Amino acid sequence: MFYKWEHNRSSSKLHYIPKVIEFLGYVPLNTYTKTFGEKIVNYRYLLGIIQKELAKSLGVDPSSLARLERDEDKPSKKYMRIMEWVPL
């Protein structure tokens, strides 16, 4: 299952990523982030969840979260407070 993923021939299903990290004992993803949107995307990957799930858990609109991930909108103070505890 992981051979193709390890050799960049396919990507692992998002929900498998937390288990892969647990198995390997490290994060095999580039977690360096330049933008707020990249930070959100990386956090979702580490959790193994889709945008809709993260938006629901944060109590925010999924379309707003999507725009933030694409860095199309500047994050409001509300979003900055929500995401300031994210460890990336």
Image (cartoon, rainbow, N blue to C red):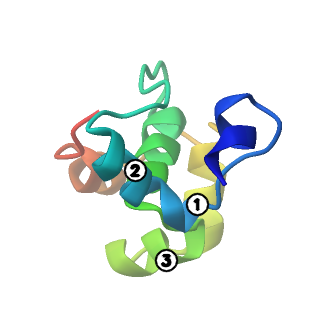
Residue tagged by mark 3? 53
Mark seen at residue 46: 2
Residue 62, image x, y percentages: 59, 72
Q: Residue at x 21, y 39 (%)?
A: 87
Helix, strand or loop for disc 2 = helix
Helix, strand or loop for disc 1 = helix
Residue tagged by mark 1? 14
Q: Which amino acid does the dot numbered 3 rest on?
A: Glu
How would you rate the neighbour count of disc 1 (Cα within 10 Å): few for under 14, some for 14-19, many for 20 or more?
A: some
Q: Is residue 32 something one can see in this rendering?
A: yes
Pointers 2 and 3 in contact (C-beta within 8 Å): no
How would you rate the neighbour count of disc 3 (Cα within 10 Å): few for under 14, some for 14-19, many for 20 or more?
A: few
- Up the image or down, 70 lies above or below 12; here it is above
Quadrant of the snapshot with the N terminus: bottom right
Of callouts 1 and 3, which one flags the residue occurring earlier in the amino acid sequence? 1
Q: Residue at x 24, y 45 (%)?
A: 86
Quadrant of the rendered image containing residue 75? top left
**Alpha carbon of mark 2 to alpha carbon of mark 3: how far?**
13 Å
Q: Residue at x 30, y 57 (%)?
A: 78
Of callouts 2 and 1, which one flags the residue occurring earlier in the amino acid sequence? 1
Residue 32, image x, y percentages: 42, 19
